[in-house]
Image: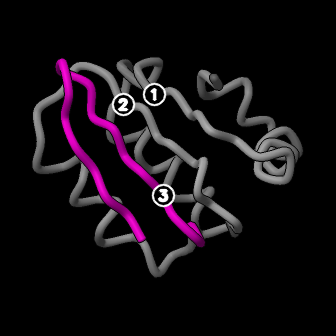
Amino acid sequence: MITHKIKDQTLWIYVSDKFTIDSFADFQAAYTNNEFKDIVIDFSETSHIDSGGLGMLLQLRTHLGEDSNRITLCGLSDHILKVFEVVNFEKLFKMA
């Protein structure tokens, strides 16, 4: 499940349970219909991410173009962090 809010020009996207292609419409709607300066994606309630979820993060990065350094991934469990490290996402996204 994807929820979001904007606070102080930062778009906060919360991913709960699983981050899979089933989340695509809600995830994309969170960032395409809002004005914001930065994005923080909170994975603290995420138990699983698959290749569809990874692809959605890459699509967000592409959508932002040169501004892709405005994305921060936070609340990473050891499991989710390991997945991101295996695919070298630490080189593409800020992680907190």
All told, the count of numbered labels is: 3
User: What's under tag 2, amino acid-wise?
Assistant: Ile
C-beta proximity under 8 Å, tags 2 and 1: yes
Q: Nearer the viewer, residue 41 or 63?
A: 41
C-beta proximity under 8 Å, tags 3 and 2: no
Q: Quadrant of residue 62?
A: top left
Along the polypeptide, which appears first: circle 2 or circle 1? 2
- Residue 87 percent across, percent down from the top left: 81, 45
Q: Quadrant of residue 24?
A: bottom left
Q: Which residue is mark 3?
A: 15
Give how far apart the Cα atoms at labels 3 and 2 are.
13 Å
Boundaries of the magenta span: 1-19
What residue is shown at x 62% (from left), y 60% (from top)? 46
Mark 3, residues whose alpha carbon is within 10 Å: few (<14), some, or many (≥20)?
many
Residue at the bottom extreme, as displayed: 22
Which quadrant, please, contains the C terminus? Answer: top right
Q: Which residue is mark 1?
A: 71
Q: Secondary structure at mark 3?
A: strand
Mark 1, residues whose alpha carbon is within 10 Å: few (<14), some, or many (≥20)?
many
